Amino acid sequence: MQTDYIYPRYEVERRESRCSGCGLCVKECSYGVHYFSKDGRTLLSDDSKCVNCQRCVATCPTHAIKIVKSNCDFRENYNWSGDSIREIMKQAGSGGVLLSSMGNPQPFPVYWDRLLLNASQVTNPPIDPLREPMETRVFLGKKPSEIARDKHGRLICDLPPRLSLELPVLFSAMSYGSISYNAHAALAAAATALGTCYNTGEGGLHENFYRYGANTIVQVASGRFGVHKDYHEAGAAIEIKMGQGAKPGIGGHLPGSKIVGDVSRTRMIPEGSDAISPAPHHDIYSIEDLRQLVFSLKEATEYKKPVIVKIAAVHNIAAIASGIARSGADVIAIDGFRGGTGAAPTRIRDNVGIPVELALAAVDTRLRDEGIRNDVSLVVGGSIRNSTDVVKAIALGADACYIATAALIAMGCHMCRNCQSGKCNWGIATQNPDLVRRLDPEEGARRLVNLLTAWKHEIMEIMGGMGINSIEALRGNRLMLRGIGLTEKELNVLGVAHAGE
Amino acid sequence: MIVLNARATDNAALNEKVRATREDCEIVGCIGERFIGAGLSDKTISIKGIPGNALGAYLNGAKIFVDGNAQDAVGDTMNEGEIVVRGNAGDAPGYAMRGGKIYIKGNAGYRAGIHMKEYRGKSPVIIIGGRCGSFLGEYQAGGLIVVLGLNKDGKRIVGNFPCAGMHGGKVLLRGRADGVVFPDKVTARTATMDELDCAKPYIEEFCRIFGMDAGEILSSPFTLVTPDSSNPYKRMYVEN
């Protein structure tokens, strides 16, 4: 019906003076935007299929292509934005739940950008990280509250299991299935080279990646896909996924069309069958039940692996985290409402949960007040975009940060936010072998290592400027932060003073 | 076979003893010790008393016999092996189990066989001699669940919402499942003799273990429940 026609969001501009007619764009576009005219002489484009992933722009040998935002839009209306109108049209036409990818794009406040960092002047000296030792290593897990000695006075060093990371950044959970084999290979190799960890997500661990086990966090979620004894033992830590920032309270659903070949083998389910992760773990209705899953995993791995519990940042996060800290978990991972996803209902992604900055501050404060902060480590994710976000998170109270969207961008993602289609032209969020081949795992790993090596240098430089020479001394050091343009209430929750105070 | 007394020990110490020996174990005096046999792939464990939650979680080939009742989450995410319970079991037995067998002589609680799966050579089986609670086989993705309903108290064989979200595997309920309401996306009908054949060896084994008459049990009609689709939510979404 004509009322359903939506003018394309993006238009392809091909500069004829530069275009050599080589047709590479036709080959490169999995969405089928570019095509030759019937006589094979002219390159044409179907703008309606374009998702603005920039693949043709980046690969065109003569740089002849430009994707521009269409200026054909509805009559301006502050209340009824173009997106609001288009979404109603889509739902009226299909009766479907709106499905989106990647993190919340709505203009909510980004508190990282409202926090400023301190530096030393006169009364304490800055440190030069290029010439003086600077410790970026962190240990995740329980910290002992007292020192024990044997009868000869020697220290008893039976510490609880921990993860040792060379820098306070880990790659967060993305399942094999939501992203490609090559993307996983790049993450695994980069984590190993960097001395940090990547995370399997709820998709099992491919047999080829068991060798990266010392740098792998294996995830157990409500669907328990690919979870078995060898899987537990392969990882350096086990993460129980209770929730995800992009879709708190919502389960996962990998459609049967993506359960092919190796993905089916790794998840240990038949090809073509939907992989449904229920919203709840049906054996967890309380902190006591969570404790049971934590300890069943510890028993199954003989108490050798730290257990992480990952939750989405929701309203009552501080009380929930306090419960988790008492459940026996070693690490709490908090995922903020801007965290990415391979697919989530748009309404949930854009409206449920709270910013991770506020959640982190509330949790750290609560755990300190209750005297249990050292019983757990805190890892936060949900849109950590750069090294200063990491430094600010640590100063707010985190032990380390999870990154995923930033890692995907390092591997080539151009944030077109169309992962749910499975047609990712950058070989990341796809299982199509021809597309997966576009991502060279070695090159991907090299770029990930580059990114985090650069961040590490920046983190050292910022810490040095503050006169701090270890992450340990920065953690929870909110005196290093000042708010800018924030209300009294926001400053209270964040536990920081305003700039100038 | 070694005998372990559960009385003077806690969960972790008891499990450590079970892991440490190469022999089969008999655990006596069991009163709620959790996680017994978690992840074990070898040996046979006999339990006198009532083991606690998550008995045989992630079981990987070991055999567990319980001479009494079991509690919640028996055989959670079990991969292979066998769990036999000579009494009742609590909620969620066989959660996400992928292989092996769980035989419960008495009743089971809510969410028995929830999210059970199957994969290649592995296809798990749960047989419940009595009745079970609501949400039997919720999200079931594979394997076989049999409920025999051998109680004589006239109560319904399963609670409410059986097979909700089922997208694989089979459920067999002995009798005509009178009064049971099934969701839209599954089909329930009387099983043919051929369809019953796949369950027959397991029911016979169940009867041998518990000293029941398989012939009599199998002479009753069975209701077979199967999903209409392995992709139940395909049409629910529109890309935005």
Image (cartoon, coloured by chain):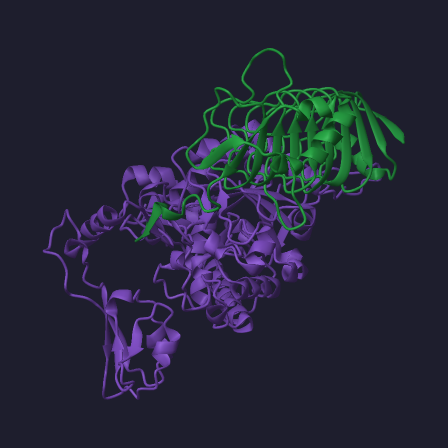
Chain colours: A purple, B green
Residue B206, image x, y percentages: 73, 28
Q: Do we see residue B56 in this rendering?
A: no
Q: Do we see residue B20 in this rendering?
A: yes
Q: Residue at x 56, y 50 (%)?
A: A472
Left or right: residue B156 compared with residue A425: right
Left or right: residue A75 compared with residue A122: left
Number of marks in the image? 0
Residue B17, image x, y percentages: 82, 34
Q: Quadrant of residue A214?
A: bottom right
Q: Is residue A69 above or below residue A319?
A: below
Please tell me which residue lies in front, B173 or A400. Answer: B173
Please tell me which residue lies in front, A262 or A153. Answer: A262
Q: Quadrant of the C terminus of chain A?
A: top left
- Farthest residue in the left direction? A75
Residue A320, image x, y percentages: 48, 33
Residue B30, image x, y percentages: 76, 21
Please tell me which residue lies in front, B226 or A500. Answer: B226
Q: Quadrant of the N terminus of chain A?
A: bottom left
Q: Is residue A253 above or below residue B90?
A: below
